[in-house]
Image (spheres, rainbow, N blue to C red):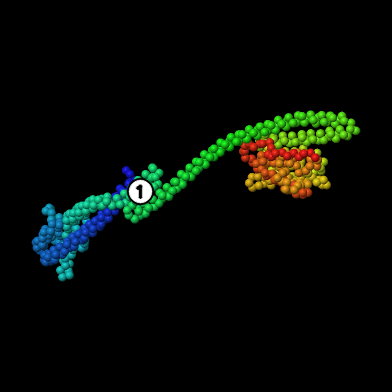
Amino acid sequence: MKRFENFPIRIKLILLFLLISFSTLAISATFFVYNDLKLFKQNLLNNLAILAGTVGANSRSAIYFEDKDAASKILSSLSENPQIKNGVLYDSQGNEFVAYDSEVSEKKSFQITEESFRRIDKETVELKKSIFLKDKKIGEIYLTADLKEYNAVLIKYVGIVGLILFFTFVVALLIAFKLQRIISQPISHLSKTTKDISKNNDYSVKVTHPYQDEIGELFNSFNEMISKIGEREKELDATNKSLLKEVEQRRTAEKILKVYSKELENSNQELQDFTSVASHDLQEPLRKIISFGDRLASQLPDSNDKAKQYVEPMQRSAQRMKQFIDDLLDYSRVGAKAKPFGKVDLNKVIYEVLENLEIQISESNAQIDFENLPSIEVDETQIYQLFQNLIGNAIKFKKKDSPSIIKIEAQSNVKGFWEITVQDNGIGFNEKYLDRIFKPFERLHGKNEYPGSGMGLTICNKIVNRHGGTLKASSSPENGTTFKIVLPEVQKVRKNIFASPLVASPRIKSEA
């Protein structure tokens, strides 16, 4: 059996209307019948009291003179009232004087010791009343009557109420069927329209209601809601089409990018291979030039100054060329032969760099201060080369009249990065050349003044970039230089597809 909540609204309205009508009528009828029956009982009791008073008054002489025959005749008049079942007259001593019984049977004895009373039980009405003669009690009368008439009236009332309730139920049912349509039909129509909209996705459908009641307001709100949903659906369709177009464009761009990336990887690999092969092919004849130049210089007599003037510049040029080729190979190896990242203690790296630069440090009387450097994820070989180039440059570009003082410090960054500074008190440089110092083969000083190929800082910058960091410099002439290296504490996985051996066209200065 369905729960009431799951019934169709049409059935709910009919049941509610019937329930209200039937309940109201039933309560009213019950109250009416109860009140009328109560009044009937009271009238019955009052009539019995009047009858008792009349019989008692007529029996005063018989009781006073103890005339039982006269009293019996008077009491037998009760037979005219079919409701009276029994009647008893008592003398002043409370003894039974005469009695009347409507049922012809053996004589009954009524010894009731109670004083005057009135009461009604389920089947009978009882009454006992005193009889007075000149304000003197001379006896009592006791009457009982049945409730057959009361029960007949009760049955009659129940039948009438039942008929009224039945006809009321029928009329209410017909009215309910008629009235429920005013509410249920618009709601059923709204429900059907909602299902059609959901099924066909047609948001142009409208619902109408002839009355401007709450249902009419509901329909108007529904139409407004459907209109807004339709507008948003159109906007969403347009957005989806735009997104699909954008996704398709991105897929096309990704395909093109993959092709370009593959071509770039191949080009970089070819360029790296070419650099290695070219460097190797250049080194081989260069070693012969240096070797034969050394032999020629060793066999020249000390007096042959003119010959030395030709041999010595050739040897110096060959050595510079060798340095260029070695630096070029180092630069290409940053991307081509990189090692995996791992946790490295930078204090250990600095100690190894200082051990390798022991001779330069001793000759220049340099002082290097550092402590409490962090452990971060790096390529240990490349980070070693980074600090060796920076410390080596700080020693090389020192002031002539004072020893080098180099400070290396590290500071944590809240974003998971470390800022490492390498500061010296050397000759410095003008910051207008900042855009040049990290380019390949760029030199701010003459080759005869300071040795080198101009590739050291270029290699440093590429190492830092490979580690996902930045390398910046600040300086001024005669006030030293500060390099700031920012490196992540933990490396992210990145694919190095731009490992080209050069980031700018080399510009090698010609010899003076």
Q: Nearer the viewer, residue 77 or 193?
A: 193
Residue that lies at the very extreme toward the right in this rendered image: 303
Q: Residue at x 29, y 50 (%)?
A: 181
Dot 1 alpha-carbon crowd within 10 angstroms: few under 14, some 14 to 19, many 20 or more: some
- Horizontal side of 368 relative to 190 (left or right) equals right
- Image quadrant where residue 300 sits: top right
The answer to whether residue 251 shows anywhere in this view is yes
Q: Secondary structure at mark 1?
A: helix
Q: Position of residue 23 (x, y in %)?
A: 28, 53
Q: Nearer the viewer, residue 409 or 38?
A: 409
Disc 1 target residue:
190
Instruction: Report the quarter where the N terminus lies.
Output: top left
Please count the marks in the image. Answer: 1
Q: Position of residue 45 (x, y in %)?
A: 19, 61
Q: Is residue 417 positioned above or below 37 on the image? A: above
Residue that lies at the very extreme toward the bottom in this rendered image: 134
- Image quadrant where residue 93 sits: bottom left
Instruction: Report the quarter where the C terminus lies.
Output: top right
The answer to whether residue 95 shows anywhere in this view is no
Q: Residue at x 9, y 61 (%)?
A: 73
Q: Nearer the viewer, residue 139 or 8?
A: 8
Q: Position of residue 355 (x, y in %)?
A: 77, 38
Q: Position of residue 223 (x, y in %)?
A: 38, 50
Q: Is residue 339 positioned above or below 87 on the image? A: above
- Horizontal side of 189 relative to 454 (left or right) equals left
Q: Nearer the viewer, residue 411 or 332?
A: 332
- Image quadrant where residue 150 sits: bottom left
Q: Residue at x 65, y 45 (%)?
A: 417
Report the amino acid beneath label 1: Leu
